[in-house]
Each structure stands twice: as structure tokens, then as C-alpha cells.
Image (cartoon, rainbow, N blue to C red):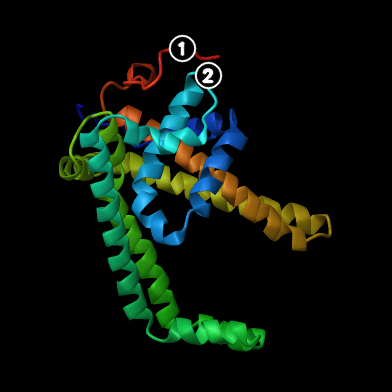
Amino acid sequence: MKLKLVPPQQGLLWVRHGLKVFFKRPMSFTMLLLIFMLVAPSVVLAIAPLATIAFMLATQHTLLGRVPTPAVYVQPLQVDKARTWAHVRLGLAYAACAVVVYLAAGAAAGDSLANLREALIANKSPEEVAALMADPRVQYWYLVIMGGLGLASVPFWYAPPLIHWGGMGAAKAVFFSTVACWRNKGALALFSLAWFGVVMAMAFVSLTVFTLMGLPQMALAAMVLGGLMLSAAFYASLFFTFADCFEPADTRDLPLDLPPQEPT
């Protein structure tokens, strides 16, 4: 597959397309995300790259007028042995990177997280909990987690679809994913910032509306539900980041695992 360069503003279109396709099948995409979240935590890290291609397939099916089902999680493993093992190796590599990030974050946090956890279990006063949360080491832990996972996502961003649709091995897919992310860093940066803005807007609207209604306690529940749906929409938008950056650009021309069908 040939890499294409896209302008930075394309990142905004990816967000728009992701929201649009999500609202075509909101229940299906949300269900897929819940299934992923309910998998045992010890397995989630290893299947995270598989979830990426699963959601891309779900978006592709939606564009073709089909209802995405949980079968998209096993579909990438039913192509051929070479690509199946490439997905397995990719998952193990991602899990190893994530473990390193969490270990580094734990080292940076020291005993600050343990102290915070004990305070919460002991139902300490809000002032004591706030003081523990203000510990710089807790902030370091968060920064290492976010920064580390953000960097780790670069080589794995396009790797799953490059394996599935491009037939690449795991190492080659990781290399080309890194190159593609760097060459289209402007669009991906705007894409990330736009999603952050959407989430913040949702939280602000939820808090404002329920506060005006005299139900501030409902704001948290609304933000959790809204956050879940926006997370599913984010995953739905990943297909467009790939379809625009690699030829063929038209989603209708990408290799399909199902017979072509006119979208409804």
C-alpha cells in the first residue's frame, strides 16, 4: 500500500466522519466497545491492536449498509495463518510496551499511589485525600502513563490494518505505521486535539445542563455515558485515518472481506 500525505485540516474531517458513522449504528459501536472493556484486563493489552482493526471493519461494514457485529473481533484472524500470527506478534509487542510504560510510571510514583489508595479505603477527609492527590509524584505517574502510551501508540497506529489489508508482517507494519504517523503528524495532531475538544465540550454541556436543572449529581452519570459513546465514536473514526493515508483512498475500493454492496 502506498503512503499518501494529507493536509492537517483532514484531521477535523476524520472526527466528523467518525461521529457521522457512529450515529448510524450507535448501539452496535457502543456494544463493541463494551465487549472490549469487559475482557479480562490481563488480555486487554494484548488484544488492543486487534480492537483497532475490529473497529475499522465495523466502520467499513456500516459504510456498506451492514450492521457490525462482535464477529469483527475474530474476522482478522480468519484470513490466513501468516496474517493471524502477525496480529498475535503485534499484540504481544504492544502488551510488552504497555507493561514497560506502567512499570516506569510506578517507579516515578513511588509509594504515593499506595498512600492515596489507603486514604480512599480508610475514607479519609476530602482535605487529606486532596493533599495526597496534590503529591507531585501522582502527577508524574499520570504524565508518564499518558506520554508513554501516546508514544507507544505511534508504531501501532496503522500496523493492524497494514497487516490485514496490506498483508505486511508485524515488524514491517510497525515501521510503516511509524513513518506514516510522522509524515501525517499535522493531521493526526489536529485529529487528537479535535477529539479532546469534543470530549471537553460534552463534559461542559452535561455539567451545565444538569446543574441548571438542579440535578448536579446526574452530571457525572451523563459524562460517563457520554464518554463511553464518544470513545466508541473515536474508534469508529480510525478507519478514515487509514483510508485517507494509504492508497486506495476511497473506502469503497479497500479490499473487503464481504461481497460489495451499495450503501444504504
Classify 10 Å Cα crowding around label 2: few (below 14), some (14-19), many (20 and above).
some
Q: Say what amino acid the circle numbered 1 marks.
A: Gln
Q: For mark 2, give the secondary structure.
A: loop
The residue nearer to you, when weighing 151 against 211, is 151
Residue 258 placement: quadrant: top left
Residue 23's place in the image compared with 179, above or below, is: above
Expressed as whole percent of the image width and height from the top left, the position of residue 85 reads 23, 42
Q: For mark 1, give the secondary structure.
A: loop
Expressed as whole percent of the image width and height from the top left, the position of residue 72 reads 44, 34
Q: Is residue 110 left or right of residue 198?
A: left
Expressed as whole percent of the image width and height from the top left, the position of residue 75 reads 39, 32
Q: Answer whether labels 1 and 2 touch (C-beta < 8 Å).
A: yes
Q: How far apart are marks 1 and 2 (CA)?
A: 8 Å
Residue for point 53% across, 19% down: 65
Q: Can residue 135 be seen in this view?
A: no
Residue 177's place in the image compared with 39, above or below, is: above
The residue nearer to you, when weighing 204 against 135, is 135
Residue for point 54% across, 35% down: 19
Classify 10 Å Cα crowding around label 1: few (below 14), some (14-19), many (20 and above).
few
Expressed as whole percent of the image width and height from the top left, the position of residue 191 reads 41, 42
Q: Earlier in the sequence, mark 1 or mark 2?
A: 2
Residue 221's place in the image compared with 21, above or below, is: below
The residue nearer to you, when weighing 50 against 71, is 71
Q: Mark 2 points at which residue?
A: 65
The residue nearer to you, when weighing 106 against 87, is 87
Residue extending farthest to the top is 262
Q: Name the residue under label 1.
A: 261
Q: Say what amino acid the circle numbered 2 marks.
A: Gly
Residue for point 40% across, 14% down: 259
* Placement of the C terminus among the 4 image quadrants: top right
* Placement of the N terminus among the 4 image quadrants: top left
